[in-house]
């Protein structure tokens, strides 16, 4: 029996584990993948306080060691079912085992949203990618198309100019949603061109991607863009499939919490990108994790 089970090992979950361990709670952090979550797919992080520049894998390692240093356990497994309504919570894991805990923090984050156009699934891993850090180097001196207009599309578009001969950002509106500093970098980069008011209709190729069919939403004109790679950055979907029957999710699948990170179920808290929030950053996930862990600590104190 654990005092606290944390589901998800990104910055929110690792920070929650670190704070809970330091508060001497018997804590386990469970993730289906490698610790660090989306940080592992980010090459350079320049907006985590105290680090002018750190790589995603480095920051993941630092947070993981920090958490373990305070005694929280780590387990690699997928949580496939939950029973949260009783005082003792139960998590069913993919390896057939179950974890019992008096409090639970959900920090499962989010995953890239798919475009849903023909060719996207067929060419995944053969030109279609959701991770420039992972796959950018395959496109040295090649043409790539980036889809989206938020921080991710613009930042990763600039990153891809390190490899690609040309980066074309295709955005459905006539202005970016991305932060001004990222937009300035994109507009100043001679390898970047932006195609506004345009959506991708199909990704075409043979063994690998060769072109993208696009449609201007104002003129309805369809045209083609040569492309060796297509990087899709159109937002994220919360990883909350396993919570569908709990009543914790809003219409978009995110978890609503109060300022103490408490959900509508006593003893269940949420932290990071999985939460209904205006800003989703590593630092906000870490902040959420700290608050959630201390709220869990106070909740557990109230039980005894
Ligand atoms: P986002 O902010 O949700 O932006 C998604 C972009 O994709 C928007 O420009 C949106 O267009 C477009 N889009 C959505 N659905 C689409 C569709 N079906 N077809 C075509 N375009 C579509 O997602 P994000 O850029 O991945 O960022 C996610 C979060 O991470 C944000 O909170 C962001 O601030 C944060 N982030 C921060 C940094 C940083 O601080 N350096 C870096 C990366 C991400 P519209 O604009 O028309 O809605």
Image (cartoon, rainbow, N blue to C red):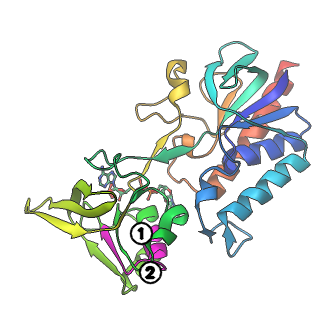
Neighbour tally class for label 2: few under 14, some 14-19, many 20 plus, Cα within 10 Å:
some
What residue appears at the point 41 percent right and 47 percent down from the top-left corner? 113
Looking at the picture, tell me which residue is in the foreground, 25 or 122.
Answer: 122
SS at mark 1 in the image:
helix
The answer to whether the residue labelled 2 contacts the one labelled 1, judged by CB atoms less than 8 Å apart, is yes
Vertical side of 16 occupied by 137: above or below: below
213 in magenta: no
Residue appearing at x 90%, y 46% in the figure:
70
Q: Position of residue 36 (x, y in %)?
A: 68, 52
- Left-right relation of 128 to 36: left
Residue topped by disc 1:
154
Query: Is residue 132 something one can see in this rendering?
Result: yes
Q: What residue sits right under mark 2 in the picture?
A: 185
Crowding at dot 1, Cα within 10 Å, few <14 / some 14-19 / many 20+, comes out as: many
Q: Quadrant of residue 250?
A: top left
Q: Name the image quarter holding the N terminus.
A: top right
Identify which residue is drawn at 19% across, 61% down.
214
Quadrant of ligand 1: it is bottom left
Question: Real-space Cα distance between discs 2 and 1?
Answer: 9 Å
Horizontally, residue 249 falls left or right of residue 115, namely right
Residue 284 % position (x, y):
63, 54
Residue 222 sits above or below residue 160 on the image: above
Residue 248, visible in the rendered structure: no
Q: Start and end of the magenta stretch?
A: 154-169
Mark 1 C-beta to ligand 1 under 8 Å = yes
């Amino acid at each position: 029996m654990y005092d606290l089970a944390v589901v998800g090992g990104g910055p929110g979950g690792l920070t929650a584990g670190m704070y809970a361990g330091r508060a001497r709670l018997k804590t386990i952090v469970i993730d289906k993948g490698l610790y660090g979550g989306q940080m592992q797919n980010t090459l350079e992080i320049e907006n985590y306080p105290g680090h002018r520049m750190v790589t995603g894998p480095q920051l993941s390692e630092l947070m993981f060691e920090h958490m373990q240093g305070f005694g929280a356990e780590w387990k690699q497994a997928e949580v496939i079912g939950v029973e949260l309504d009783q005082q003792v919570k139960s998590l069913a894991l993919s390896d057939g085992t179950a974890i019992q805990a008096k409090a639970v923090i959900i920090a499962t984050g989010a995953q890239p949203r798919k475009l849903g156009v023909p060719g996207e699934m067929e060419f995944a891993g053969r030109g279609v990618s959701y991770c420039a850090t992972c796959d950018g180097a395959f496109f040295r001196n090649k043409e790539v198309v980036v889809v989206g207009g938020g921080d991710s599309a613009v930042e990763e578009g600039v990153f891809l100019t390190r490899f690609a001969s040309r980066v074309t950002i295709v955005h459905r509106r006539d202005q970016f949603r991305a932060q001004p500093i990222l937009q300035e970098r994109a507009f100043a980069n001679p390898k970047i061109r932006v195609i506004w008011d345009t959506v991708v209709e199909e990704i075409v190729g043979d063994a690998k991607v060769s072109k993208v069919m696009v449609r201007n939403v104002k003129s309805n004109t369809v045209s083609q863009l040569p492309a060796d790679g297509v990087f899709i950055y159109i937002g994220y979907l919360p990883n909350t499939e396993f919570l569908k029957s709990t009543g914790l999710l809003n219409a978009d699948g995110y978890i609503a919490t109060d300022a103490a990170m408490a959900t509508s179920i006593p003893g269940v808290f949420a932290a990071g990108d999985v939460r209904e929030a205006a800003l989703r950053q590593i630092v906000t996930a870490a902040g959420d994790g700290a608050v959630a862990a201390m709220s869990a600590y106070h909740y557990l104190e109230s039980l005894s």
